[in-house]
């Protein structure tokens, strides 16, 4: 089996920490408008991050990546994710002790200890790691030569209101010659017959 690739969807979501904990390849951040390979996609559990996750385009056939919702507080239910988009959805709990320092070294040692020897707040993290590994192994995607391909659409610019068309000169229909406008002085000199409107 090859080593999985863990890729983040949003900045600061904990993808590098998860990659260290699973001893996998850190795929970095999947930038808008780019395609990349990912066995595991990591995002925050907020509405904005979940919208970004659900707009990802995955390969039409074959295994789908595992979506990890990182930083969920204990007792908070996992937000709903549209079915069929991911191979599995796993909630990865928030570990308060890892907020101040770089947690990658400590995260890398989590799976080396039996759960009963881990601090209480790390036990939930270790259980989530086991669920991620089970989902990856059960999907069969680690037997494939490459991870699933995912792409993130480029952010669309919002357009508000109507904009008048840009005009660079007198308006004319395409293909017609531009007629010369008459001179104001020439118009004043022209005689006007009585009764002419």
Image (cartoon, rainbow, N blue to C red):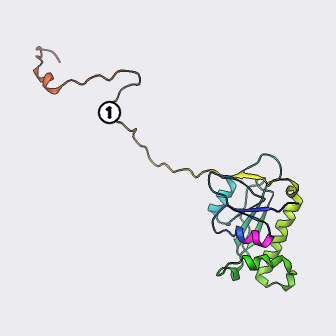
Asked if residue 35 is positioned above or below residue 23 in the image, the reply reads above
State how many labels appear. Answer: 1
In-front residue for pair 156/48: 156
Q: Quadrant of residue 70?
A: bottom right
- Residue 21 magenta: yes
Residue in the picture at 78% in, 45% down: 60
Is residue 78 shown to the viewer in this render?
yes
Which quadrant would the N terminus be assigned to in this image?
Answer: bottom right
Report the residue at 21% width, 23% height from top.
182
What x and y, as percent, mark residue 121? 76, 81
Q: In the rendered image, which quarter is residue 30 located in?
A: bottom right
- The residue nearer to you, when weighing 174 against 83, is 174
Assign a secondary structure to mark 1. loop
The answer to whether residue 113 is left or right of residue 42 is: right
Residue 165 in percent (x, y) is at: 40, 38
Q: Residue at x 34, y 36 (%)?
A: 168
| Prevailing SS of the magenta stretch | helix
Residue 2, picture quadrant: bottom right
Asked if residue 81 lies left or right of residue 126, the reply is left
Query: Does the rendering let one see residue 74?
Result: no
Q: Which residue is mark 1?
A: 169
Q: Tell me: residue 144, above or below residue 169.
A: below
Is residue 124 positioned above or below 160 on the image?
Answer: below
- Horizontal and vertical percent position of residue 75: 74, 76
Neighbour tally class for label 1: few under 14, some 14-19, many 20 plus, Cα within 10 Å? few
Q: Is residue 34 magenta?
A: no
x then y, percent, for residue 120: 79, 84
Does residue 45 lie above or below 148 as drawn? below
User: Range of the magenta residues?
Assistant: 17-22
Name which residue lies at 66% across and 81% down: 101
Q: Quadrant of the C terminus?
A: top left
């Amino acid at each position: 089996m090859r080593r999985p690739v863990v890729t983040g969807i949003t900045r600061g979501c904990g993808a590098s920490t998860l990659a260290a904990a699973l001893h996998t390849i850190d795929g970095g951040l999947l930038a808008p408008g780019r395609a990349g390979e990912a066995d595991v996609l990591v995002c925050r559990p907020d509405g904005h991050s979940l919208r970004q996750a659900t707009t990802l385009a995955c390969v039409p056939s074959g295994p789908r990546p595992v979506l990890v919702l990182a930083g969920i507080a204990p007792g908070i239910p996992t937000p709903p994710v549209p079915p069929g988009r991911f191979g599995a959805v796993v909630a990865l709990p928030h570990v308060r002790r890892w907020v101040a320092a770089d947690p990658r070294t400590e995260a890398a040692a989590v799976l080396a200890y039996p759960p009963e020897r881990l601090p209480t707040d790390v036990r939930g993290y270790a259980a989530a790691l086991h669920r991620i590994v089970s989902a990856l192994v059960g999907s069969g995607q680690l037997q494939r030569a490459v991870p699933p391909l995912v792409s993130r659409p480029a952010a669309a610019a919002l357009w508000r209101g109507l904009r008048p068309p840009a005009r660079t000169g007198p308006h004319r229909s395409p293909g017609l010659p531009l007629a010369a406008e008459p001179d104001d002085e020439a118009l004043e000199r022209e005689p006007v017959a009585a009764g002419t409107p």
